[in-house]
Image (cartoon, rainbow, N blue to C red):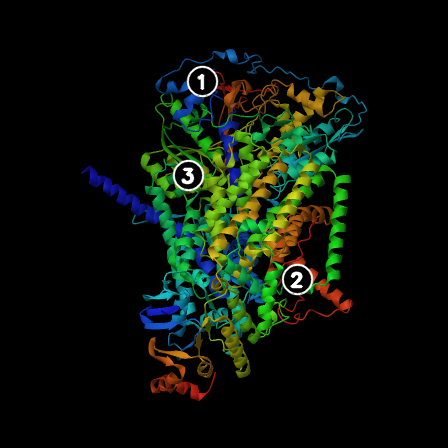
Amino acid sequence: MSLLAADGITKRFAGITAVDDVHIALDAGERVGLIGPNGAGKTTLFNCLLGLLRPDAGSVSFDGEDITRLPVYRRARLGIGRTFQRVELFSGSSVRDHLLFAHRIRRGTGALWKDLLGLGLPKPVEIERCDALLDSLGLGGMGDEPIEALSLGQSRLVEVARALMTQPRVVLLDEPSSGLDRAETNALADTLARIQAEQGFGLLLVEHDVELVASFTERTYVLDFGRLITHGSTADVMQDPEVRSAYLGDFAAGPS
Amino acid sequence: MAARFWKLALILAALALVASACGNAGNDDEGGAPATTAAPAAPEEPDDEPAPEEADDEPAPAPEEAGDDEPAPDGEPEAEPEPEEPKEPEHRHTFVPISGVPGVNDSEIKVTSIVTISNNALGTNIAAYNDGIEAYFNYINDTGGIYGRELVLANKRDDQLFSNQAESLAMVEEDDSLAAFVATLLFFGADTLNDAGVPVFGWNIHNEFADRWNIVGNIAPSCIGCIHQLFPWVATQVGATKVGIFGYGNSENSKICAEGTRDSVEHYSAEAGGMTVEFFDTSIEFGLAGGVAPQVSEMKDKGVDFIFTCLDLNGMRTIAQELVKQDYRDQVTMYHPNTYNHEFVAANADLFEGDLVFVQFVPFEAEIDSELQRRFFEYTEGLKLEEQTIVGWLNAHLFYDGLLAAGPEFDRASLMEAVRSFEDYSHDGLTNPIDWNRQIPLPNDNIDADYEYRCVNGVQVQDGAFVQWTGEPGKPWLCWETVRTDWHDPEALTFVG
Amino acid sequence: MTASVLAAGVVEETVRAFFQGLPIGAGFALVAMSFVLTYKTSGVFNLAFGAQAFISAATYFELHVRRDWPIWSAVLVAVVLVAPALGLLLERLVFRHVHAASAVAKLVISLGLMVALPELFKLIVDYNREQPFGAVGIIPDGTTVYRLFGRYPVTRDEIAAFVIVVAAAVALAALFRYTRFGLRIRAVVQSPRMTELNGVNADWVSSGSWMLSSFFAGLAGVLLVPTTSSLGTVLEPQGYFPIVISALAAAALGRLVNLPAALFGGLALGIVTTQMRTHVPRDNVILAELQGPALPYVMLFAIIVFWPAIRRQVAGADPLLGVSPPPPALAATSRSRGMTIYTRIMALAFFTAVGIWTFGYANNFWISRITHSVIFSIIFLSIVVFTGLGGQIALCQVTFAAIGAFGAMQFAQRWDISVIVGMVAGAAIAAAVGAVLSIPVMRLGGIWLAIATLAFALFFHDVLVKYSWVGGSLFHGRGVPRPEFFGVDFSSRENFLILCVAILVLVGVLIILIRESSTGMALRALRGSETAAESIGVVSWRSRVIVFSVSAAIAAIGGGLLAMEERLVGYESNYDPQTGLFWLVIVVVLGARTVEGGVQAGVAFVIFPELVLDRWLGLHGAWRYVLFGFAAISFARHPEGLLEHGKRRSQALMQRAFGRRQPAMAAAGAGEPADSGTETGGEP
């Protein structure tokens, strides 16, 4: 049984079927891609997995448990982390704060009375743990920087770090390459691969950048017009003529 | 919209209440209860009062003038002008050096006024209160002042509606005035002044004028929501038999007032020619953004021919407009508790023709044989007269009389002692006589603290102006003896003397 | 037979109520459309509508009634000239510079203008020199009555208003749909930058749309005078307020963007009002409230909470809607150690000096003023929690403060329980009320939350206060004693001041603890990005409930202390909902993000008018509304507050003077050197 699985997800908007009976699955330690041209339903499916949208049919399960009706934060607490296509950081907070928030919330130690007694202040050990993760992501020494000061690549790393601080069992990455150049994208991929190897979470990569998917993932799902047109090992998928015609022509024409 | 509409609205209702339910008469019919509801008033009835509610269908309940708990009507002020205070006491011009009394030096006696001048969205000109005080002081100073000193309104404070307590405290701390003159829409500084021993003369539209030794008003504390012959009697005078009553749903004051009116009409229903309350609405909202069209239609359907309200100017105008619109204005008379405003009535002449407006002093339209009234007109010539002008004048007069009675070696305490010793004080006939010694608490549960006579003074609107309506020439007041709760016609009186 | 007669009577009454409701609804619709027009053309939720309408109506009154100008010339000046000129002025001087600001920031600015504009007008024109009675409409013989179908009376004024409302709705709809100007307005509101790229002069379009909406507000202002009872009596700006509340409900039906919905919503609400008053009995307390004082607020609240369009809008596209403008970079460490020590020494010196003066030399008046400023600082800290920490705007903090005050009063009066216990109980009640209130408004953000809380505040004010179990009885007064506990008597002014300072310090420390701990982290995360916060497991409803409760409890503690200080509940003086709007403005202007900012606002609120305006400058107290009201404009550019902004600037200057390096990131972000938002809790 897969760690995260979507069975027969269907979602319609005003009569248009954005996602039609899609099944996907993800296991711990896996790196899986989800690709498709614009409007293929990637984001809709993604949001169904996260709980931002509720599917009209089908179910989502996590570790054998049906989570179709759980709200976003409950899924997050079960161990589903994510990043955003358009960077979503906590404006007004420092880099370290992002990690600290995630860490705290994951541990669920937010009782108001503790805070009022001064027991809720950040402890040195927590700060050390945050800094350690920042170090390993190559953001060492930037803990105190206000988030607005970071480059886009660094911001994406902070998003990753924030997701990782919740000790996720799967991480869903939403177009991590968008806005990054090739070198930055590769660096990000390398870092992700390294951390994943250490922590063993499953990775689902929703991506426009087929090159990244090809080099980074083991398996790939391809969506078009809301339907799953194929899936399998990434190498096989990339050779699939249907995929090439539906999608990769686009790729040949030029990257982002 | 910086101003404070809702606050004002609350105040408006307070005004409506005081003016209608109490002010007009300051009376108390049943010692009982502010009767928040009609029927169950009984249990709250103090036992010194024979339950009056059984009177409802009885033609003439035994006149309860078992006046044993009422000080016998001693000084009958009727007709006979019998000057009690000598016009020019010997010692008026006696100068005695005084030290240590705030606001008093060898040439001046200074007082402070606290008036709601800014942020008063009533449209009324309360600042006219200062005019009244100054006019009176001019009059006294022109005739030689008092104790060799001039009376001076030295400091005019504006409480801007919401800082009454702060202004009161500032006045106390400044410690440079003998007394405070207060005409404000809120009176949260009452205890600040009273506790500091400052003599306060003011415009009594607040409960704070009760139970405080150092605070006296243009009228005495008056009954709120009590049963009163006035209401049904006034309606009978215009031949009305079916009444409608309005009160604001936003305000406890206004509701109690409306309920008191309703209870009065129902209490005397049989005697007043079978008068009935056909329409009763205490749910209308301040501002009346939703109008009153359905209510007026309902009254019209039911044949209401007299409307009592516990409302402000805006409420009166809105109802009158709707009456006109529904072609029904000619068939109803309205009772105004709070409309003695010449400019307002002139601006709305068509709306209020024939309506009755009640006040707590002899209106400008009624001439009586009163030196104080003549001087008032003399010294306010050229000023625009408002209700507050005469309130200031009356307050200043009481202050002066108190000083005179306190003697040339006065201080704050002796001034108040003197004022509180006046047992039959009518401001030279301009108000219903007050026993300042007795009338300290609210008289709702305590007939001993009530006026001896329940008196009203009313004018009628004719062509956008006021015409004296109550009484007869020279005797503008219409009075019921307080201890008599049976139904009877009032007497026309004057209190000059 | 009788039944059919009865039925005929009901039908007749219903038809009659329908025609009685139409003119009232036309008034609501006129104002509602004005809201929609301004929102559509500028993205501003313009609470200053009443102020704009008032200025035109008052100008017309001044010219036509007081100076006897003929109607046409007075209308020309008041509506055709003054109103658009005011719109142009507002656009050029104010709104042009805040185009990119959030809806909430613009709401705060419009609150400021609402406070400032009428007061400024009155000060300049000397409008109150005599009673503003006798205002008339712009239709000659407007009170002439006609009869529809021979029986339903309607005045010429009402017909005119109705016709103009419908015509305006059609014309405006056509303008937006078919004309290039309308198209451009819409484009400019969406994205001025983009529009400019397409060769449209966004400046000009923006000015034009402000002139148009201001013209409409002015027209509504004069048209409403004869048909709105509160205006026809005394022409004062607050006369627009009752109608504005119902109009807000109508505008909400169209999500502030749909003109036809505002038109039909307004008419429908007018008809609902008269139908209720015709058919619903008044002998039941709740039914009477529902058709009377409670009606507009219940309608407004219910529409905001339950109207599906608004729920969709909130849940939908605009993720920034609920979020106050992003705060400038916050970096505690960027302030140098020396600077921090210096600031603290200065603060210590200041408070020591004030303390010595207060206890050694000040008279009772000044002790009382200082106590008031300490207490208002506490109350304003509730705004710091709600707005500074929670990132939302609530307009009902006055209500919570009043609940605290009444709590202290009721416990002391009814059960003779220590007033301190009463205050704490009042705070607990306020916290509970806040928690309950937070549930229906849970999904709302930004302006809708602000309006819903305003409706709640007005409901409390107009409906609940009069009940003796809330506001006390008319006959018992509202006296409140000062406390005594642990053998210490706090009845003297000095001792009571010490108690208040102690409570202020305690509350300030608790707020800092909350901010720096888990709860505060969740709040900061939510304020930064709700979506991202939920993705790491932040429970937004829980945070909402906590913010409502904590801030309500703080306001209630302040309210309880204020009642003890004044020895009575000065409800009408202190807790008016419109006073609450000014509270928000002054806190936001001076700094809603820090404990320090709240304290400064408390001091400014109490001391500034007394000391600076009155004693030093000899100005009228109304200038405070003008000054702070206009200062709200700065909110969009300096959401951290003017004082905080000033400190940052001076720190930057000092750092330059001392040759210190600018913090790495000063160049980014807002271009302001970063400063501590976290570290400045240093009050005594």
Q: In which quarter of the image is the C terminus of chain B?
A: top right
Whether C124 is drawn above or below B393: the answer is below
Question: What residue would you read off at disc 3?
Answer: B283
Question: What residue would you read off at disc 2?
Answer: C332
Figure quadrant of residue A251: bottom left
Residue at x-position 69% and y-position 19%: B87
- Identity, as a three-letter code, of the amino acid under mark 2: Ala
In the image, are marks 1 and 3 on the same chain? yes
- Identity, as a three-letter code, of the amino acid under mark 3: Ser
First in sequence: mark 1 vs mark 3: 3
x and y, in percent, of residue C492 in the image: 69, 34
Figure quadrant of residue A57: bottom left
- Identity, as a three-letter code, of the amino acid under mark 1: Thr
In the image, are marks 3 and 2 on the same chain? no
Q: Tag count in the figure?
A: 3
- Residue nearer the viewer, A184 or C607: A184
Question: What residue would you read off at disc 1?
Answer: B485
Residue at x-position 61% and y-position 49%: C510
Label pair 1/3, CB-CB below 8 angstroms: no
Q: Looking at this view, name the residue that lies furthest to the left.
A: C1
Q: Could you tell me how far apart the alpha carbons at marks 3 and 2 are, in whole angstroms?
A: 56 Å
Relative to residue B372, is residue B293 drawn left or right? left
